[in-house]
Image: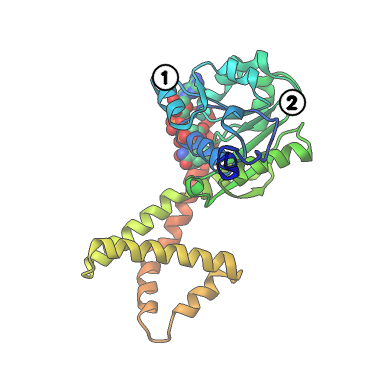
Amino acid sequence: MSTELEYENTLPPAAMPGIKVAILGTGKMGGILLQAFLKNNLLHAEQIIATVAHPERAHALSAQYSVEVTTDNLEAAKQADVILLGVKPIQVPALIEQIRPALSPQKMLVSFAASVKTSAIEDAAGIEMPVVRSMPNTPAMLGAGITALCRGRFVSEDQLGIAQRIFGTVGRTVVVDEKHMDAVTGLSGSGPAFIYIIIEALAEAGVNVGLPRDIATQLAAQTTFGSARMVLETGYHPALLKDAVTTPAGCTVDGILELEEGGLRVTLIKAVKRATQRAKELAAG
Ligand SMILES: NC(=O)C1=CN([C@@H]2O[C@H](COP(=O)(O)OP(=O)(O)OC[C@H]3O[C@@H](n4cnc5c(N)ncnc54)[C@H](O)[C@@H]3O)[C@@H](O)[C@H]2O)C=CC1
Ligand SMILES: O=C(O)[C@@H]1CCC=N1
């Protein structure tokens, strides 16, 4: 028997051996995480159990990823060491009520639901157990996301580290005080939607000045991507990078004048403020 074949049939060791993770509410965000755990070899398929609301979706998801998928949240929570909460904010208390018999201080709850406070999760759990609250975003699908995390009252450094490794599979992570979580939600949680609108508008503008749509979309998206990389990788203030584009008496400054007259800055500030405000309310419905 060739050693090459043996190698191909042997999975590399999982980065978190011996830990079982449940994803309760495997929708858009939960699905992205499930895929990333497998792709990045954080966990092997048998270390994951996922739940959804409907049996048909359970079958489809299970077939797609070869992981156990069920509609039984309690059973999934019983099997898991780390339990991710991925249902809608308003559904979180009922979900915790459902899995309460399976909870213990040796397990950890990691919520990625907007709005729901760690204290509310701890209270619903009814025992002193580790709770981490997180806010990822959808560029997670490409490993290009950013997740902010904050800790509840009973979380050790090691447990926070586990949560960071979990979200490290989908991009960068930052740890913040819980008082910042709704603002994070309004900025980076909702932010991709705001950026897509900007890209869509820039592409539309390109079409308006005569570019073919596919070229215009590519130009708009790559310009957004490259500009974001410049901010992240040079460390320069965005205003300085903007000034470097703006040739005296050139065309950019004319464009900037229009943006300022149109109130783009204020509009974006208002959008993030409004999303932050809504994030504060979501847990209550
Ligand atoms: N979509 C996004 O960009 C982000 C979403 N979130 C949070 O992720 C959570 C889910 O949001 P999405 O994935 O966008 O929504 P979604 O609707 O795609 O996912 C929710 C999933 O939960 C399932 N579900 C509902 N009740 C259930 C139950 N009792 N047991 C098991 N599964 C159940 C649904 O079938 C659905 O698949 C929300 O709390 C949201 O705040 C957080 C960061 C970003
Ligand atoms: O729109 C929402 O409520 C969720 C949270 C952040 C992004 N999507």
The earlier-in-sequence mark between 2 and 1 is: 1
Which quadrant of the structure image shows residue 198? Answer: bottom left
- How many angstroms separate mark 2 from mark 1 (CA)? 29 Å
Q: Is residue 64 above or below residue 218?
A: above
Q: Amino acid at mark 1?
A: His
Residue 64 visible: yes
Q: Which residue is mark 1?
A: 54
The label on residue 129 is 2
Residue 278 visible: no
Q: Is residue 284 above or below residue 218?
A: above
**Residue 219 placed where, x, y %?**
35, 66
Residue at the (59%, 20%) spot, across then down: 76
From the image, state whether disc 2 or disc 1 is nearer to you.
1
Secondary element at tag 2: loop
Q: Residue furthest bottom?
A: 249
**Where's the N terminus, which quadrant?**
top right
**Residue 3 placed where, x, y %?**
60, 43
**Residue 203 placed where, x, y %?**
30, 62
268 vs 111, nearest the viewer: 111
Question: Is residue 134 toward the left or the right of residue 255 in the image?
Answer: right
Secondary element at tag 1: loop
Residue at the (47%, 23%) spot, across then down: 52
Q: Is residue 274 above or below residue 246?
A: above
Asked whether mark 1 lies closer than 8 Å to ligand 1, one says: yes
